[in-house]
Amino acid sequence: RKVGIDPTESNIHSADVSDLRGGANNNNKDICNGVQAKEFSVPGVALSISPQALATLSMATCMSLHYLGYSLARPVTMTMFTSNRLGFGSSAVSAYPFAMTFISPVSFLLLLFYGGCLNRSGPYLALKQTTLSCAGVLGLSSLLLARLDPLLDTHPHLSTLTKYIVGVLFVFRESYVQLITSQHWSFISSVLTPSQSSMWFAPISGLTSVTSALAAICVGKLSAVWGIPGVVGAAGLFLAFSVIFGDIAYRIAEKHGFNPADEHYRKKEAKLKAAASKGGSNKNTASTSSSSSPPSKHDKEESLIVKAKDVFTRVPTLWALFCEILACQGLSTVLNVCCVTKVAEVIPDDAERADWMGKFFAFTNVVSSVLQFGV
């Protein structure tokens, strides 16, 4: 029995992934037509896996490692934020909601950073650059906090600095997760057909929940060995390690002719040629370069707003889902604030609180995994 993806189905793929996320439409004839994907056989086992399946599996592994690191960082950053030693202590009740207000602006800045990486380097290098940059922030924060923690006993004035570092780390940790995840899903949705996506998206999400649960269970033991700042450093290492599997996924896609990045480069080249043709053949090199410049920022923003309005008008269900997401996110934020502040009151010890929160998030991930595999 064949396990994986039938390469002939890629010719009927109609999912459209936006350029912003670096995806591609597999309807493109240059990518799909004439591509005869080879299957890989596992020695000694009656099993064959298509290149699309291998690429998807590699990117799913990449995403699982990303969530593994995130699940290590989430309970310890919450613990440090409410810590009397490193964080805001008793004032966390008011500081926590205040910090939550910065998550959306920081997410927007990270999105701008990703957009610049995507335009300069394409989807593959954009994933690598953003992932390694986020891992670097986690690693640097871990080193700073580990170095400052012992000095707080003799230099109490450094507590203000640690509060700022912990606050920035907390906001960053809440912001970067979707930036990285959206790139993983963009690749996977570009490789799979709609029918395959409906079948495999839930198990892939379940896999990430399993790895997240395993990581969260280990938070207490790891914090006892490495210290709470050390767990943040471990999260950064796992995030950096995930780049290897993202590289494997893109290499497989490039080798077998279904690399989503190809469509990005084609569209970019087509835009430059169209802009150059408007300048006319009589213009000099300088004027041609000027005419080939991309649209202004105002034009891009207006175009995105018009497109979004048009989509919501044509598909009212999307507007309803958008409103539902906003309502759920608002309720989730309120519950999150209430939970974290109450746990900080009931469990004052940092190590014990980190262990409890890790197990709590592990339980929620197990429940999520069961529901995702069941669906």
Image (cartoon, helix red, strand yellow):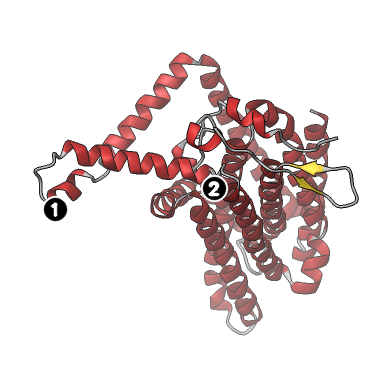
User: Which residue is at a point 73% across and 40% down the rendered structure image?
Assistant: 204
- In this view of the protein, can residue 217 be seen by the observer? yes
**Residue at the bottom extreme, as displayed:** 154
Left or right of residue 250: residue 287:
left
Left or right of residue 6: residue 281:
left
Q: In the rendered structure, find residue 179 and report the number of the disc placed on it.
A: 2
Q: In the rendered structure, find residue 286 and report the number of the disc placed on it.
A: 1
Residue 239 vertical position relative to residue 298 in the rendered view, above or below: below
| Residue toward you, 274 or 230 | 274
Q: What element carries label 2?
A: helix
Mark 2 is on which residue type?
Leu
- In this view of the protein, can residue 82 be seen by the observer? no
Where is residue 118 drawn, in percent x and y? 44, 50
Q: Is mark 1 on a helix, strand or loop?
A: helix
Mark 1 is on which residue type?
Ala
Left or right of residue 142: residue 203:
right
